[in-house]
Amino acid sequence: MLRRLFAEGALTQSFVPVLTEIKIKENEHSTRAFQSAILSLLLLVTGTICLFFVIFPKQIISLYAWGLDASDPRLHVASTLLPIVGLFLPLISLISFYCSVLNTHKRFFVAGVLPAISNVVLIVVAWSSNGVSQGVYYLSWALVAGAVIQIVMVTFHARRLLKGVGFTSQIFHPGVARVFKMILAGMFGLSAVQLSLFLDGNLASFLPVGSMSWLYYAERLIYLPLGTIGVSLASICLPSLSESISKHNHQAAQRELQRSAHMIFLLGIPSAVGLFFLAKPIISILFERGEFLAKDVEMTALALQYFSFGLPFMMLMKIWIAAAYSFKRVDLTVRAAFIAIAVNLIVALSFMGSIQHCAISLAVSTSSLVQASYLYMRLTKVSGLRIIDFASLKFLFFPLVAMVFVVMGFESYYVHGMLHAGLWLSALIVSSVIVYFLTYFSIMRLNLVS
């Protein structure tokens, strides 16, 4: 939750538009002074939070999981891990600062590759500590080590762009006030999904043992397309959109928004469809071994299916929130967040008795739909732009139908067993992707010819 606020979330969304505007309207000295002030404040705030994690770990964990009493061993384990994982917050915040600077200079490759570095470190450590007692502690330190490696890489690539930028006591640059005003105003807007998950995590702690883990594994799979598509598109869109708005080029701003929305529909909807239909085999192949039993597969797959309904809207929110910050209308994200959190709680509490942990994932999907819809309507009215080209969406219907037919056709060929199931799933995904895009581009070509 704090990572979404101080790293890829509120700070980045606030920092990039202000930095872009300062670069256009002010001199280089002012730009570097602004960057130094933000960097210093960012490390001061996240470092202080990290210190609280070290001093009060048990109290902080108790705030997050009300259903765990003092004698619960899960509370002890989580409290021991928090001071280690807490070190990750200032590190990832610093990484996001450097990546934001690179993005404003239209250098996206390094920022896109960096998360893979951390994943490689985690995988290597997980593999080498397999079967080791308390291996989760090795993983926690691996997370921190991966962040250190990322900092070294991103600092090397951004060193020329940040020449003259460093820690300073001069933190009262005018741009800082504008950034923190946007952060304070939009804190709920940008962290709506995370705040909902915070509340949902507490609700899940009252459900049967395993519920929190089932939701966690399902959420990880949802964040794969959400991170690679939604977050990436928002990161690419934000600098260009902020620049277009600063230059009052509304036609370019509309074109950027329409293109981003179309890419989300083009890639996000088939991702959601694939996760819905293939939830069980994906979960089984990835996790079903050791303590992860057949029941865990079934429960996690159900949660993933409910999450998949909201995936395209979670992606769209990334774009709409970036647009709201670019238009300096952070208040829209605040209102959307309050509405979404209310919807989330109502849905979760209404269905927990019947579908238990799946009520949490249903609540997240429903609140994402409501939040994305509200932001779309308000942004359209505020900006006067047509931010979605609905006419282009008709070209997605037949590709989706073709993709579903491929998935359904492959079902009868499913073979149990790790190797065979993995090959089957790989063949299915590749085939469905090929059919989907072949159908889409064929329809687009026919339309252009006609």
Image (cartoon, rainbow, N blue to C red):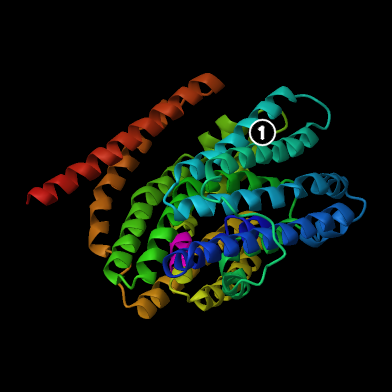
Q: Residue at x 33, y 50 (%)?
A: 266
| Residue 111 located left or right of residue 406 | right
**Given the image, on which type of amino acid does mark 1 rest?**
Leu
| Residue 36 located left or right of residue 246 | right
Residue 10 showing in the rendered view: no
Q: Nearer the viewer, residue 449 or 109?
A: 109
Quadrant of the rendered image containing residue 122: top right
Q: Main secondary structure of the magenta part?
A: helix
Mark 1 = which residue?
122
Quadrant of the rendered image containing residue 251: bottom left
Image label count = 1
Q: Is residue 318 magenta?
A: yes
Residue furthest top as drawn: 419
Residue furthest right as drawn: 71
Specify start and end residues of the magenta stretch as a single range: 316-323
Image coordinates of residue 247 in percent, x first then y, are 35, 70
Image coordinates of residue 156 in percent, x first then y, are 57, 39
SS type, badge 1: helix
- Using the image, determine if residue 331 lies above or below residue 406: below
Image coordinates of residue 312 in percent, x first then y, are 43, 56
Quadrant that contains the N terminus: bottom right
Q: Nearer the viewer, residue 137 or 9?
A: 9
Q: Residues within 10 Å of mark 1 (few under 14, many from 20)?
A: many
- Using the image, determine if residue 47 lies above or below residue 187: above
